[in-house]
Image (cartoon, rainbow, N blue to C red):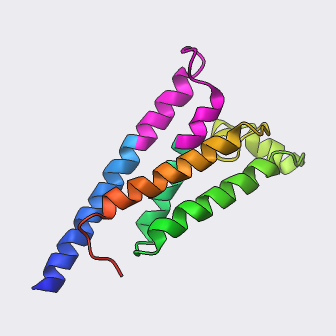
Amino acid sequence: MESLNNATSYKQLKKRILFSLAIILTIGLLYSHYRYSIWWLNQEVGGIFYEIFWCLFAFLFITTRSSVWQIPLWVLVITCLLEFMQLWDQPFLNWVRSFWWGKMLFGSVFTWADFPYYFIGSGFGWLWLRLCVRGVKLK
């Protein structure tokens, strides 16, 4: 009976994560559309949504108790590396960044101001994952 309950709670967890992804993706896309029309939305705030999205997305595939804190840490490290990669001026990377999805995924302009938002977003990603796994037994 416990394995049946665990399977049910695992399905509920996946539903929570998918629902959370739908929410954060919608917010992130709306943000990317409206950030220039509302004065208090600056470009760096998008880093928060970006970090949360990747934390949730990675958790779909790596669903363990320890991944709740490891995923936000790795997302933060990788995002910081991607930010530094924007300093690298390579023809292939410039070509990828010429597309909307390339700019959204890799960014196009290095700025130190992005880093605090990456830390905040990873922190929120960690909190979001903790809320999602509440009441679910994971390995």
Can you give x and y, in whole percent of width and height, for residue 7 in the image? Answer: 21, 76
The structure residue drawn at horizontal position 69% and vertical position 44%, both measured from the top left corner, is 115
| Residue 132: x %, y % from top left | 32, 59
Q: Verify whether residue 45 appears in magenta.
A: yes
| 122 vs 13: above or below | above
Q: Nearer the viewer, residue 48 or 53?
A: 48
Q: Quadrant of residue 24?
A: top left
Q: Residue furthest left?
A: 1
Q: Name the residue at 47% across, 49% down.
A: 124
Left or right of 29, for residue 137? left
Q: Is residue 96 above or below residue 81?
A: above
The answer to whether residue 128 is left or right of residue 45 is: left
In the rendered image, the quadrant that contains the N terminus is bottom left
Q: Nearer the viewer, residue 33 or 115?
A: 115
> Is residue 36 part of the magenta span, yes or no?
yes
Q: Quadrant of residue 116?
A: top right
Query: In the image, which residues are magenta?
Result: 24-48
Quadrant occupied by the C terminus? bottom left
Q: What x and y, as percent, mark residue 103?
A: 69, 39
Main SS, magenta region, reads helix
Q: Is residue 53 visible?
A: no
Please provide percent x and percent y for residue 19. Answer: 31, 49
Report whether 138 appears left or right of 38: left
Q: Residue at x 40, y 59 (%)?
A: 129
Q: Where is residue 110, by image quadrant?
A: top right
Res 25 visible:
yes
Which residue does the image show at 28% across and 63% down from the upper left?
134
